[in-house]
Image (cartoon, grey):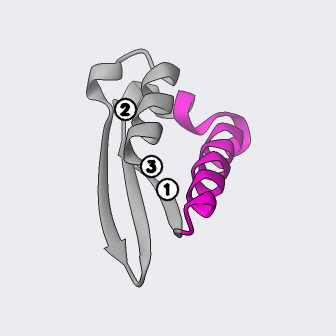
Amino acid sequence: MKELLTYVAQNLVDHPEQVSVSQFEDDGETVLELRVAPEDMGKVIGRQGRIAKEIRTLIRSVAQRTGKRVSVEIVD
């Protein structure tokens, strides 16, 4: 999951070298924290949060196939 999120984020932003994803467990759920450059934050979130919502949907659906619970947090 971490690699997929990194790949998607790096292809959305202008500064792919500044994309970082950290992973930790919280109450039986895997949480992925996505960090990007401040000027790329809008590209990851999108208008009215549409891109962020689609990223979360994509990661959640892939995780469901493996029987895991995963959430994505975009951190500034």
Which residues, given as a range, are shown in magenta?
A: 43-67
Mark toward the start of the polypeptide (1 vs 2) = 2
Task: Please name the amino acid that badge 3 sits on.
Answer: Met
- The answer to whether residue 41 is left or right of residue 17 is right
Which residue is drawn at the image coordinates 33% and 73% (left, top)? 25
Mark 2 residue crowding within 10 angstroms, few (<14) / some (14–19) / many (20+) = few
Give x and y (percent) for residue 16.
35, 21
Q: Is residue 66 above or below residue 53?
A: below
Magenta portion: prevailing SS class: helix
Instruction: For marks 1 and 3, give the CA distance.
Output: 10 Å
**Residue 5 shows up from this direction:** yes
Foreground label between 2 and 3: 3
Which residue is drawn at the image coordinates 46% and 40% (left, top)? 5
SS under mark 2: helix
| Count of residue discs | 3
Residue that mark 2 sits on: 38
Residue that mark 3 sits on: 1
Q: Is residue 16 above or below residue 28?
A: above
Give x and y (percent) for residue 60.
61, 57
Residue that mark 1 sits on: 72
Q: Is residue 54 above or below residue 67?
A: above
Residue 60 shown in magenta = yes
Which residue is drawn at the image coordinates 44% and 29% (left, top)? 7
Task: Please name the amino acid that badge 2 sits on.
Answer: Pro
Give x and y (percent) for residue 41.
47, 34
Mark toward the start of the polypeptide (1 vs 3) = 3
SS under mark 1: strand
In the figure, residue 52 lies in which quadrant?
top right
**Front one among 64 and 42:** 64
Foreground label between 1 and 2: 1
SS under mark 3: loop
**Front one among 6 and 46:** 6
